[in-house]
Amino acid sequence: MGIQDYGFLEDLQVEFKDYDGTNGFFLCFWFYLNKASTLPSTILLQKHPVATSHAPFLLLDEKKRLLLYPLLTSWREDAYATSESEFPMKKWVHVGCEVTKDLLRLYLDGEIVGEKSLTSSLNNDSVSDSSEISLPCISGKGSQLDGYVYSAELLPVVSSIKNHYVKDPPVQLSIDSSSAYEIEEDTDGVWSIVGGKASCRRNFSLDVTLMDSFSRPITEEVEVVALLVYADDEAPVEKPVDDEAPLLTNYDGIEYASSDRPSKVISGRASFKLKISQLSSKCDNRLFCIRFEIPKMGNYPFLEVFSRPIRCISRNRNTRAASLMLRKSSLGIHLLNGSQSPILEDGSSDLPSIVREAKQSLSSKRVKLGQEKLCANFKDDFVLQQANGESKSHSWISEDNYAYHNSLVARPVSRGRAENFSSDSENSETTNSVIDDLPSNLDPISDVDVFKYCLGDLNERRLLLKEMAMTAKEEELATFAERVSLFSGCSHHRHQISISKRLIEEGIKCWNLISDDNHHVPWMNLVSGLQEHFLKMTFGRTRSLTHQDFDLLRRVSSCQDLVSQDNFEKLWCWLYPVAFTLSQQCITSLWGSASPVWIEGFITKEEAESSLRGQGPGTFILRFPTSRSWPHPDAGNLVATYVGSDYTIHHRLVSLDFIYSFGSKGMTIKPIQDMLLEQPELRRLGRIVRSQ
């Protein structure tokens, strides 16, 4: 990739040997500013052996604006071209300097950002006879800036700066935030990851991309290494004596020290499946970071990238009784301010607020389900299902006919004999009465499956549901959902379990129609097929997907120009719960509303935050979380991103559980728009500002 063309700012030196620059010149280069510890600071200095003093050529002032000065022959302190905006940090920017005896022009990324007309006058510190002065040397030596330069070139003024800008852009390593998987974000913006001993820690996934400045993937294959460092000083986390490495990576079911197993960049992307064995509590509660770097390409900051700060925790060990108590006490309580929040139009029932903090609770233990592939092909499972004679045609059920079969709750039993719950010292009288009221019919889904689901991580739950959905009936899955809700103490899991059979069957149909028995599908073919299927899933009552929506779907699924079935399944597990949400009557009105625009398509958290900066408290934007895919309890739900009273941006989950449960019973519910605006934190609807 021409790594030899990258260099330090202090090593840049422009000499005008055998170059007639009397009519002016262009100096073009890519500039990466890593740190600016002292401001103002000279970027490039012009030197002349005859002149009594040196003068700046390119300077960064105290407001981080670029200033371009004329040559010594016409240098004046008040004559310079300047940019109006702040120069960005940690990002490649193309800088162009046009210098003639009458004019200065400053270019950033091929566009003019500053211009200054000059008069012919000399500074007193310059020599008097300008005809004796040749063009000076322009150098970065002595600059106090931590900067890097790529592809510097001296051109005549008849050349085009834009040609140099687009010809050979530099590269930069970045983290694809949309690829984050099994990573929770705390209210302080810190990532929360379950780690520690081998029996408790969880896998999490993250992708890094190697792109040029125009976001085009690099085709060369290089290796990226992941290392665990401290967030405050970027020092490596120490490996305990005779213990595992602090950061582990998983290859074919075997764990290695991450430093020993780099990941290859293929088509501009490297995927990591990692575990952290070191806990923050054992390191003086310090936060960690993951540093990704490309050692073989040199120690450059643009070829390394750091994750957000990480708090590595062990599993929560709340008792089942505490979980049940939390579930019971949360009813009827506004989860943001603790007040009662009735949502039915007739006021006959108090229900929990639809807005709550978007954070997943962690279970206390984990049962390993094995090293099976996360998403076995839908198609292979479907063939096996047909061979067993269990195939049924289940079309998408409208929200008017859809119910959760709340009466089909089976008594928890083990195989062969009933479980004795009366001896459980944690059970309250209320809990016993709930269990006693359960029907006595036996359920083909065993207690072991219930416990596996309650204690497993997201990948294990997905694998277990896929296996069940191929053989179990809708009623059996509804029963299973109720039992999981009972034993986990959280009813939030029911929805994802209940839609699993239809999700898988619809996914099989969609892929078969689009792929036509091919292993890979061109992205554009997938787009047209998904567009048609999306409208069918939402009954054609909602607007179709836009180009921006498909861009986000492509990032969620890591799809390239040719889409594999694995990538399709990753996309489908995110899109299906969203489509189901949009098929509900109350959400359809939000999605289809043109004035005001309640939901502006599929957007990332970063786009929502950027659009809300500078807005007043109470301004909010609705979005679907890109990091939540089936069977995550929050998959398909909405998130309200809003400006709080402290002028900082917050994220709250819009819980739709009550819509599915109470709406299926025929109860009248207020329009969701009214319920949102009743929240004290949400006052006015914001708009998305999309970057061009």
Image: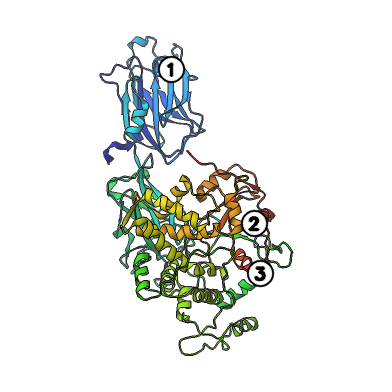
Q: Which residue is mark 3?
A: 331
Quadrant where the N terminus sits is top left
Is 373 above or below relative to 221? below
- Residue nearest the viewer, comparing 648 with 61: 648
Q: Quadrant of residue 200?
A: bottom left
Q: Which residue is mark 1?
A: 103
Residue 662, percent from left and from top: 64, 67
Q: Which residue is mark 2?
A: 672
Q: Amino acid at mark 1?
A: Leu
Q: Earlier in the sequence, mark 1 or mark 2?
A: 1
Q: Residue furthest left?
A: 18
Q: Amino acid at mark 3?
A: Leu
Label 2: state its secondary structure: helix
Residue 557, percent from left and from top: 41, 55
Q: Amino acid at mark 2?
A: Ile
Is 484 above or below relative to 556? below
- Image label count: 3
